[in-house]
Image: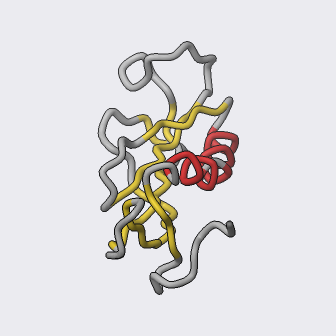
């Protein structure tokens, strides 16, 4: 069963990483979070969708970046697309940040 929600859905998957702003040495922990899928309704979506369409929120806790809702034709596709888009979102954000695994030493992306 997928939730029908207007509140922030519960996080069901999390990837812990660290970041540094470009040109800075300090490392700060943050988490990439994926929410449970939720049914899209006119109250929680500003895009057109078919019956049964769902979304998952992709958020960056501890990083001052806006959360994004990833849409899919159903709950499975929304979850698949949200998880599959983590690296592409981080790659886009890497214009501003350098990302590392939790130890703060090993780069998340190979140069």
What is the residue that sits farthest to the top in this orientation?
Answer: 48
Report whether 51 appears left or right of 20. right
Q: Image quadrant of residue 53?
A: top right
- 109 vs 21, left or right, is right
| Rendered position, 1 above or below 54 | below
Establish if 72 lies above or below 16. above
Quarter holding the C terminus is bottom right
20 horizontally vs 54: left or right: left
Across and down, in percent, residue 64 comes to 30, 51
Give residue 57's position: percent from left, percent from top.
46, 44
Q: Which of the two residues, 52 or 87, is positioned nearer the viewer here?
A: 87
Count of number-bearing discs: 0
Q: How is the image coloured?
A: secondary structure
Q: Which residue lies most toward the front here?
A: 23
Residue under the image location 33 percent in, 33 percent down: 6
**Location of residue 109 in the rendering, given as x and y in whole percent from the top left corner:** 63, 66
Residue drawn at x 36%, y 41% is: 66
In this rendered view, identify the residue nearer to me: 96 or 76: 96
Res 26 quadrant in image = bottom left
Q: Position of residue 23 (x, y in %)?
A: 39, 63
Q: Nearer the viewer, residue 99 or 67?
A: 99
């Amino acid at each position: 069963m997928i939730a029908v929600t207007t509140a922030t859905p519960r996080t069901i998957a999390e990837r812990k990483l660290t970041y540094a702003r470009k040109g800075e040495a300090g490392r700060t922990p943050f988490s990439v979070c994926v929410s449970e899928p939720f049914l899209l309704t006119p109250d929680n979506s500003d895009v057109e969708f078919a019956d049964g369409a769902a979304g998952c929120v992709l958020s960056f806790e501890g990083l001052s970046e806006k959360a994004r809702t990833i849409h899919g034709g159903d709950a499975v596709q929304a979850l698949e697309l949200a998880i599959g888009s983590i690296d592409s979102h981080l790659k886009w954000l890497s214009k501003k940040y350098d990302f590392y695994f939790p130890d703060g030493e090993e780069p998340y992306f190979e140069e």
